[in-house]
């Protein structure tokens, strides 16, 4: 690829001009831009000039839902958490849609591995897999223990009524992405709405916490950086835990491997028990949160299915995610019918 060329969604000349003006000295050579694999929602690009590397994030092409894909929110959260005990890339600069048609931001490149493909997970031994699972939970517990006001995020969201708003938000996003009838998913939303638990103390929540949203050092069993903060807010920390469990032990999908299905990786119960030890939180209501996690993943996949039908997804496998939505609805019903012992 020539320096002038670029992948869909970014104008390399316009971006280079912006960086030279707003971050003088950052680039020491011609700018190159490459679309990175993954990113079920916002698009992620690798920037380079022959000596340095950075990462750019922007919303998806086409059909962007209201309140989603907030670049300013991601940038703000990274800036707040970078000095904290939660490892995140350092944000460098943000730009508006005048540069190449969409808001975006640029951050430092986190050097490590994103474990998304099955062969990557299969290359790890059981001890390495257990250390990574433990590190995943440790960072989540650290995030939830971070005082929002102390890092300047005390007004990031409205904790009161968080779960009810989440249910309304994802129902609204499903309606905005409607291309087919999904009665079991609609029924799941109804059941969740009838049994909303009382929330405990609010925390900073990531909103989409899972292994392939982390940059890790597999050999050292460490989390180098947590990525993809577009859904971060102040809310119920058990929603984050349930999201991690659902992605860890959910159905196989064409864009990321489910760790619990790889030999040598611990079960989802390992995550639950580790979080209970570190956080001291009461997890009795976790089955409801897990049911909601599957509902939310189904809504995300349905939105991608809608964009795929319009030819607006970028990357391999996204056009097949819609096939998983009915099964996710079924898993949500099963979770609601279970109890904490079944997860552990």
Image: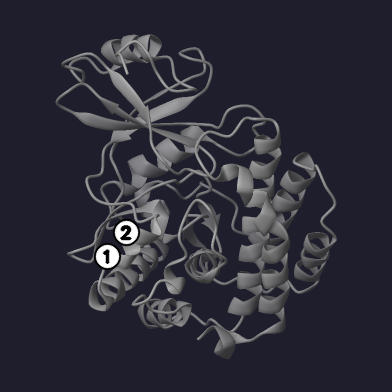
Does residue 77 appear left or right of residue 41 in this picture?
Answer: left
Q: Is residue 157 left or right of residue 88?
A: right
Category of crowding for the residue at label 1, using alpha-carbon neighbours closer than 10 angstroms: few (below 14), some (14–19), many (at least 20): few
Considering the numbered disc 1 on the image, is that residue within a helix, a strand or a loop?
loop
Q: In x, y percent, where is residue 103?
A: 50, 24
Q: Which residue occupies the foreground of this view, 127 or 147?
A: 127
Position of residue 160 relative to residue 70, above or below, is: below
**Residue 275's x, y, as percent?**
41, 77
Give the label on residue 120, or none: 2
Q: Residue at x 40, y 55 (%)?
A: 212
Residue matched to label 1: 123
Image vertical order of residue 285 relative to residue 120, above or below: below
- The structure residue drawn at horizontal position 25% and vertical position 44%, both measured from the top left corner, is 110
Occupied quadrant, residue 76? top left
From the viewer's perspective, tell me whether residue 267 is left or right of residue 298.
left
Provide the secondary structure element on which disc 2 rests.
Answer: helix
Tell whether label 2 touches label 1 (CB within 8 Å): yes
* Residue 296 shows in this picture: yes
Distance of mark 1 from mark 2, alpha carbons? 5 Å
């Amino acid at each position: 690829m020539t320096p002038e060329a670029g992948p869909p969604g970014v104008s390399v000349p316009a971006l280079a001009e912006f960086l030279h003006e707003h971050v003088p000295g950052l680039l020491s050579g011609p700018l190159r831009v490459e679309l990175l694999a993954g990113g079920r929602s916002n698009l992620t690009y690798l920037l380079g000039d022959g000596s340095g590397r950075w990462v750019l994030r922007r919303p998806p092409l086409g059909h962007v839902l209201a309140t989603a894909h907030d670049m300013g929110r991601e940038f703000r959260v990274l800036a707040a958490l970078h000095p904290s005990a939660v490892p995140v890339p350092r944000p460098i600069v943000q730009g508006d849609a005048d540069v190449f048609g969409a808001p975006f931001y640029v951050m430092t490149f986190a050097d490590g591995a994103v474990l998304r493909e099955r062969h990557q997970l299969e290359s790890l031994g059981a001890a390495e897999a257990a250390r990574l699972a433990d590190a995943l939970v440790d960072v989540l517990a650290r995030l939830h223990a971070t005082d929002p006001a102390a890092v300047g995020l005390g007004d990031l969201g409205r904790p009161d009524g968080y779960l009810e708003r989440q249910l309304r938000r994802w129902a609204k996003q499903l309606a905005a992405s409607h291309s087919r009838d999904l009665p079991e998913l609609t029924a799941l939303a109804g059941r969740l709405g009838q049994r909303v638990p009382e929330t405990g103390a609010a925390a900073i929540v990531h909103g989409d916490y899972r292994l392939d949203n982390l940059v890790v050092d597999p050999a050292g069993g460490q989390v180098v950086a947590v990525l993809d903060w577009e859904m971060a807010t102040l809310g119920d920390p058990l929603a984050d835990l349930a999201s991690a469990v659902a992605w860890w032990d959910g159905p196989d999908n064409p864009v990321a491997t489910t760790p619990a299905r790889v030999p040598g990786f611990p079960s989802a119960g390992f995550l639950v028990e580790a979080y209970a030890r570190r956080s001291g939180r009461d997890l009795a209501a976790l089955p409801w949160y897990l049911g909601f996690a599957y509902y939310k993943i189904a809504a995300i996949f349905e939105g991608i299915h809608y964009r795929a039908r319009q030819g607006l997804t970028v990357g391999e496998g996204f056009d097949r995610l819609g096939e998983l939505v009915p099964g996710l609805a079924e898993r949500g019903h099963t979770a609601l019918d279970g109890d904490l012992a079944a997860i552990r």
